[in-house]
Image: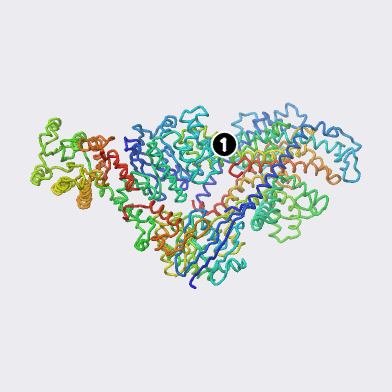
């Protein structure tokens, strides 16, 4: 299931709580800042991890999202509606959609109530289930869903083990089929094997119920398994955010690196204890101050862009999206310049057509000469073929694919990087394919060219980041264009790819997986590559 | 024989309302001199009971039914209580699990450390005070002169664990039992504490029994590892061998779960 | 690390004590109800010729007066039996009313906090500054003697016991995560107080209530002792003590017997209360 | 002990005292309607009543009455006693030292005895000493101080006459002490025979007063000692090889005392209040005894003065308890 529309948006959230330990004889109780200026977005069905060490404010953030603390600044927008200061009465309709699983299952279940009562309470308050029999039926179903027998209905919380209590916590949270669940450190204090079972349960529920999940934890390993995106928190501030994979592979902030390197992996590493694990706090705070300039975010409005392969599919949608988001000028390129006529007539003031075959060096040189004002390069052009390695014509086909998909893209980057640098930095977007990450029979050459292009993109990024140019690799899955006609539905509309890409640019991402099956692949890669291949096999024709 | 501590065929159980349930079923454990010996097990495996049996602080409902604990040429199990306490408290120290609750909250840090020195090292008050400052310095506490006058609640968790480590090493013990000493700490602090324990251990040559449920931590600090499962040591190997070539099925399982759990690309 | 043998033993003995307390209280209730049929004599009937008779185990006793007589020749046993009525009525009514008042204020103050809490806490603090015995004596002196005055005095003085404890416990419970959980499933504040917090405060409350019944028995005795309780021709334990005290040198038993009655009643209430808390608490019950 | 804390506590005392004064006033003037009815001797005429009414300003509006009375109180003037025809403040001051000596002695006994019992019960827990301690505290919670007083009189005054049962001092002794603090002064002057008779007179009322509080302290302290003994730092001390008594007293006792001290504030109030009956029973010449007399005599100004005095005593005691709480608990010490 693909992440859908925006579910919850947190804008510049601030929280300060009164600190009684510092209260004076007269006057107001002084406040301690817990959270400063936190922004995040979570889409439907997506899971967001929030990690941080003790005192980072991660628990407070979760509780504030549920309005268990009153925010002192900023906004909470749920499904487009501002709920920051909604009264408890008006909040009721949202409470149904946002539920929480608490850290301490012991204290979060009322010791005086039987499980039956604890579970059916939400039904009567928010679910409008009046009949007892109906409530009973739902309770049984949900208990079964979280892997407990319905005998548990008659038990008291203190009669359960830690893992069972946490299952009850989960059951209570899903009673009302919410859209978002905030899970606060729900597996800390449990054995590793119990942890794994609880996490599996949660992952299954998330998939089956299309839940969005905010998963708060101090344990990076846990978050790694469950989440799509990650927010690293320190002293109430966001230190780093982005795709989980990206952060684990190439953390930008020194603090995140430090955090990651401190996790002891179960293998012998004689050097792990040597070196200087302690991190100077002044170094850390400098880094916090600089982090905004280090991250290369790109502003789409007022940009000047060049888009290759703009005559159809994703490329065409890029041109439309850029114009729509206020780009100053867009150079639309295609091998056959006539195929761009309708785009140019539609946006005559903004779009200029350029004839460009990316396998032709002369074309590229010409384009670089005429487009000296650009700060965004979108390499979309590419070809794909369905052919077996051992097929008669496969060598020439492989060469052709390599020529376009790899060398073509590389030439473009080489030609335009100096221009971007001269213009004070910008961004390069290489549209690759999810195939860069997985192999697929009959598409071996294509996969090779795409993954070569991905590696090249990573190299380009390493080189250009220092020059102020952001480099984004976009790896779409099945997209509804004529190029993916061999794939079965569902397919993502190409316009969505363009939109997601532009917003990823604005938030400084480095990798983007979009399109049906792409995010599944991204998740699957985290766990079991073989399983991904199996899943992928379904997309093969024949 | 080069073993500091030799536990042989130890049976131990708890009686509850006339119902007896065994906890350890013939445990064998041998800790070599100047080594960090890991003891791994999930909760309920009996690892803290084993630690308590060695330290001689078993709750009254728990009894040792069979077996020996050889330490410094004595069998701790058969020894009279008083002598045993004398021997164990002098030569076996402990680093506890939760630094937040393991220091007396109403007594100054310096006094708590000083008392131990005066009891076992027979130092007078002034000498003890000087030694306390040295010890705090050894565990890399920045401002020892200030810290000795502070109360535990004024220190962070990591600092408290440093104080407790100083306390454990203070009387130059033969053996230190570290019972999940980093479980309650943040990962970054955990790394510092592990480093500190390793450093002090190699400087002093003390043996350490390092109890943990976390194979990651064990991999980083231990020379030898014993795996405890349902009251039995199912495997005892050098750490290098254990992680490369686990022999027992339970160990293999545990290692697989943990490795799966910790699959990070950045270390590939 | 709990020691199971120990908790097992305590559990057993506390169960025994609960039963013992309950049985004694039950007996006292029966005695109070059936006083007219049990009592061998009219408690008010004077017989000046047989004053200060000794109880049965001493010489100089009259088999007609099992526990002897007071200075006016009234039967001590009958007076003790009728005294049970007053003691129990005061205990049940006064303690319940004090509990009601104190609990409501304590719950509201603890849960809602803010100005309400400030006012209630301040009020309790002021109340605590009064010496309780003196205040009760003054109160009864002001509003006049009689059963209702005794009850009113006890309620006015002892509501703070409930209020303090219930407020403190409510504050503790309010911080528990299950309250956050109740908020997040959209419970109204009033419902949370009623359905989530109150059941958790209840065991404590029941214990306090039974303890307070014991205290009420004592306060009634104190007031009778000072001569400010119900009218002097009604038989009360405290009145009997006061009377016996005047002849303590010649007839010490007149004072001792009602004292024993009071101690037994209070012990029974206390035992019942301690036991009930264990039984009512599902966590402790395990 | 930080000065701002003391200041804050003292500032907070003011509203409490004002509250006490208001309630005393309202209680005695408003509730039953007419305080004069409380004062009048049987057979008084209408004229007498009117005269009294004017004398005490009772014909004025209630608020004005209060303000007049309270401003006098602030000046230290509680009026004149009706029954004793003496200045109320003078009367109270002459009797107060006796009560203070008694109460302090009782508090001292209960703290020492309660702590010892708790330590004994914890050290030999699950053995017969604990059973005895438990039995003692259980019994004591059922026997109020005035019953103890009567039991003592019966036992040591009547059945086995060992101790004097009334008064503060043997009336045959010729006293030439200048202050009312007899015990303190006799000790300072070295008059031990006087001191001894004083103690003999005081011992029964003091113990009777002390026993209920002893039970509370023993029970609560034992419970928190028991809890404390399971803490990790106690286990650490055992591992380090400290002796059991040392662990109990040096490591555990101070921690265990913190909750006990926190709850004993109220209990000290009960002890102070207990002096009223105990002094009556033992004919001990303190303000407690005086208050019952005042109520019987319907002596309005004296009752008011006495209640306020008790309130001040309570506030002072609580201040002391609060400060010892802060001394014991380093966490709150420097706030």
Vertical arrangement, residue A505 with respect to residue B148, above or below: above
Vertical arrangement, residue D235 with respect to residue A400, above or below: below
* Relative image position of residue A220 (x, y in whole percent): 38, 50
The answer to whether residue A468 of the structure is visible from this angle is: no
Considering the image in quadrants, where does the N terminus of chain A appear?
Answer: top left
* Relative image position of residue B173 (x, y in whole percent): 50, 68
Q: Which chain carries label 1?
A: C
Specify the farthest residue to the bottom: B1
The one nearer the camera, C20 or D324, is C20
The one nearer the camera, A81 or A519, is A519
* Relative image position of residue A324 (x, y in whole percent): 21, 33
Q: Residue D42's quadrant in the figure? A: top right
For label 1, the residue is C198
The one nearer the camera, D170 or A40, is A40
* Relative image position of residue C33 (x, y in whole percent): 77, 32
Within 10 Å of disc 1 (Cα), the crowding (few <14, some 14-19, many 20+) is many
Answer left or right for D155 relative to D142. Answer: right
Residue at disc 1, secondary structure: helix
């Amino acid at each position: 299931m693909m992440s859908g529309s925006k579910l919850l948006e947190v804008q510049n959230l601030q929280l300060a709580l009164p600190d009684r330990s510092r209260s004076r004889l007269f006057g107001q109780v002084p406040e301690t800042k817990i959270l400063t200026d936190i922004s995040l977005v979570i889409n439907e069905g997506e899971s967001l991890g929030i990690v941080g060490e003790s005192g980072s404010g991660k628990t407070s953030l979760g509780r504030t999202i549920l309005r268990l603390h009153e925010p002192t600044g900023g906004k909470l927008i749920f499904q487009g509606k501002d709920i920051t200061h909604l009264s408890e009465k008006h909040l009721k309709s949202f409470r149904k959609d946002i539920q929480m699983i608490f850290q301490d299952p012991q204290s979060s279940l009322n010791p005086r109530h039987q499980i039956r009562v604890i579970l059916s309470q939400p039904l009567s308050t928010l679910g409008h289930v009046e009949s007892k029999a109906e409530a009973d039926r739902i309770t049984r179903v949900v208990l079964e869903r979280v892997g407990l027998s319905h005998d548990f209905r008659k038990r008291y919380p203190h009669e359960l083990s830690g893992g069972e209590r946490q299952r009850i916590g989960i059951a209570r949270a899903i009673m009302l089929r919410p859209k978002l669940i905030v899970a606060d450190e729900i597996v800390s204090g449990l054995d590793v094997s119990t942890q794994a079972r609880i996490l599996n349960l949660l992952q299954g529920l998330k998939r089956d119920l299309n839940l969005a999940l905010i998963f708060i934890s101090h344990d990076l390993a846990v978050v790694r398994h469950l989440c799509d995106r990650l927010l690293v928190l320190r002293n109430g501030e966001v230190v780093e955010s982005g795709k989980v994979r990206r952060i684990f592979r190439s953390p930008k902030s020194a603090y995140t690196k430090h955090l990651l390197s401190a996790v002891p992996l179960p293998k012998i590493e004689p050097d792990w204890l040597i070196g200087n694990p302690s991190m100077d706090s002044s170094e850390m705070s400098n880094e916090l101050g600089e982090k905004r300039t280090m991250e290369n975010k790109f502003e789409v409005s007022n940009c000047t862009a060049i888009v290759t392969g703009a005559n159809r599919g994703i490329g065409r949608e890029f041109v439309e999206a850029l114009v729509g988001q206020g780009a100053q000028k867009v150079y639309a390129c295609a091998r056959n310049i006539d195929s761009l006529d309708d785009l140019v007539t539609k946006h005559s003031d903004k779009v200029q057509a350029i004839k460009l075959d990316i396998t032709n060096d002369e074309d590229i040189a010409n384009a670089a000469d005429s487009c000296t004002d650009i700060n965004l390069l979108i390499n979309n052009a590419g070809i794909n073929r369905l052919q077996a390695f051992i097929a008669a014509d496969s060598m020439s086909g492989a060469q052709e694919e390599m020529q376009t998909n790899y060398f073509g893209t590389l030439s473009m980057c080489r030609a335009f990087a100096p221009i971007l640098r001269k213009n004070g930095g910008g961004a390069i977007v290489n549209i690759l394919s999810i195939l860069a990450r997985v192999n697929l029979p009959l598409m071996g050459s294509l996969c090779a060219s795409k993954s070569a292009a991905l590696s090249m993109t990573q190299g380009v990024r390493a080189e250009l980041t220092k020059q102020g140019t952001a480099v984004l690799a976009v790896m779409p899955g099945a997209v509804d264009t004529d190029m993916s006609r061999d794939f079965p539905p569902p397919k993502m509309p190409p316009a969505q790819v363009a939109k997601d890409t532009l917003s990823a640019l604005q938030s400084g991402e480095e990798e983007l997986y979009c399109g049906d099956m792409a995010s599944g692949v991204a998740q699957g890669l985290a766990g079991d590559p073989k399983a991904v291949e199996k899943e992928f096999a379904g997309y093969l024709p024949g | 024989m080069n073993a500091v501590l030799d536990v042989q065929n130890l049976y131990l159980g708890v009686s509850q309302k006339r119902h007896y349930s065994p906890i350890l079923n013939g445990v064998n454990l041998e800790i070599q001199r100047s080594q960090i010996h890991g003891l791994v097990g999930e909760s309920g495996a009996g690892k803290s009971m084993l630690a308590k049996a060695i330290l001689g602080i078993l709750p009254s409902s728990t009894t040792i039914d069979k077996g020996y604990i050889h330490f410094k040429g004595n069998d701790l199990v058969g020894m009279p209580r008083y002598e045993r306490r004398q021997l164990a408290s002098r030569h076996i120290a402990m680093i506890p699990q939760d630094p937040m609750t393991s220091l007396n909250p109403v007594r100054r840090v310096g006094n708590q450390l000083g008392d131990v020195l005066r009891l076992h090292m027979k130092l007078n008050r002034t000498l003890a005070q000087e030694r306390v400052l040295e010890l705090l310095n050894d565990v890399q506490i920045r401002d020892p002169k200030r810290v000795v006058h502070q109360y535990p609640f004024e220190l962070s968790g990591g600092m408290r664990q440093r104080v407790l480590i100083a306390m454990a090493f203070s009387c130059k013990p033969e053996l230190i039992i570290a019972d999940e000493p980093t479980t309650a700490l943040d990962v970054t602090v955990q790394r510092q504490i592990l480093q500190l324990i390793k450093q002090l251990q190699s400087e002093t040559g003390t043996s350490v029994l390092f109890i943990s449920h976390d194979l990651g931590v064990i991999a980083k600090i231990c020379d030898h590892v014993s795996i405890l499962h349902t009251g039995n040591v199912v495997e005892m190997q050098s750490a290098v061998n254990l992680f490369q070539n686990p022999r027992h099925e339970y160990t293999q399982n545990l290692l697989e779960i943990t490795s799966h759990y910790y699959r990070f690309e950045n270390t590939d | 690390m709990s020691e199971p043998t120990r908790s097992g033993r305590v559990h057993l003995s506390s169960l025994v004590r609960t039963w013992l307390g309950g049985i004694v209280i039950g007996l006292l209730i029966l005695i109070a109800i059936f006083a007219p049929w049990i009592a061998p004599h009219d408690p008010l009937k004077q017989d000046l010729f047989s004053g200060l008779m000794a109880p049965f185990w001493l010489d100089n006793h009259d088999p007609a007066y099992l526990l002897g007589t007071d200075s006016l020749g009234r039967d001590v046993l009958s007076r003790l039996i009728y005294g049970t009525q007053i003691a129990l009525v005061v205990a049940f009514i006064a303690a319940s009313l004090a509990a009601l008042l104190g609990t409501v204020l304590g719950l509201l103050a603890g849960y809602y906090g803010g100005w309400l809490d400030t006012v209630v806490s301040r009020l309790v603090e002021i109340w605590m500054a009064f010496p309780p015995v003196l205040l009760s004596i003054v109160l009864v002196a002001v509003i006049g003697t009689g059963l209702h005055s005794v009850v009113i005095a006890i309620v006015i003085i002892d509501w703070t016991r409930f209020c303090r404890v219930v407020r403190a416990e409510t504050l503790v419970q309010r911080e528990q995560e299950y309250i956050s959980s109740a908020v997040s499933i959209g419970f109204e504040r009033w419902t949370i107080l009623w359905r989530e917090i109150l059941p958790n405060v209840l065991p404590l409350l029941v214990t306090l209530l039974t303890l307070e019944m014991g205290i009420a028995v004592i306060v009634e005795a104190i007031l009778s002792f000072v001569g400010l309780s119900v009218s002097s021709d009604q038989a009360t334990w405290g009145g009997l003590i006061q009377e016996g005290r005047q002849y303590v040198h010649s007839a010490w038993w007149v004072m001792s017997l009602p004292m024993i009655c009071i101690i037994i009643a209070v012990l029974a209430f206390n035992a019942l209360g301690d036991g009930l808390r264990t039984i009512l608490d599902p966590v402790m019950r395990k | 002990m930080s000065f701002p804390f003391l200041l804050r506590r003292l500032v907070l005392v003011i509203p409490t005292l004002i509250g006490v004064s208001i309630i005393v006033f309202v209680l005695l003037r408003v509730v039953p309607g007419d305080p004069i009815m409380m004062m009048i001797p049987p057979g008084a005429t209408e004229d007498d009543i009117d005269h009294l009414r004017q004398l005490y300003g009772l014909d004025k509006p209630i608020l004005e009455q209060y303000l007049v009375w309270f401003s006098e109180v602030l000046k230290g003037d509680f009026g004149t006693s009706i029954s004793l025809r003496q200045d109320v403040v003078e009367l109270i001051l002459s009797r107060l030292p006796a009560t203070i000596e008694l109460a302090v002695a009782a508090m001292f006994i209960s703290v020492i005895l309660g702590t010892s019992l708790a330590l004994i019960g914890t050290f030999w827990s699950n053995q017969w000493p604990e059973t005895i301690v438990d039995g003692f505290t259980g019994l004591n919670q059922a026997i109020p101080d005035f019953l103890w007083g009567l039991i003592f009189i019966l036992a040591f005054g009547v059945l086995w006459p060992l101790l004097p049962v009334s008064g503060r001092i043997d009336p045959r002794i010729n006293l030439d002490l200048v202050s009312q603090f007899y015990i303190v002064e006799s000790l300072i002057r070295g008059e031990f025979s006087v001191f001894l008779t004083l103690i003999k007179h005081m011992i029964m009322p003091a113990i009777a007063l002390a026993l209920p509080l002893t039970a509370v302290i023993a029970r609560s302290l034992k419970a928190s000692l028991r809890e404390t003994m399971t803490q990790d730092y106690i286990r650490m001390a055992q591992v380090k090889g400290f002796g059991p008594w040392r662990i109990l007293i040096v490591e555990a006792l101070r921690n265990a005392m913190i909750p006990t001290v926190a709850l004993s504030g109220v209990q000290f109030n009960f002890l102070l209040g207990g002096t009223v009956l105990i002094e009556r029973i033992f004919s001990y010449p303190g303000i407690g005894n005086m208050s019952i007399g005042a109520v019987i005599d319907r002596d309005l100004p004296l009752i008011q003065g006495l209640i306020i005095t008790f309130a001040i005593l309570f506030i002072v005691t609580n201040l002391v308890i609060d400060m010892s709480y802060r001394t014991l608990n380093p966490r709150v010490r420097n706030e």
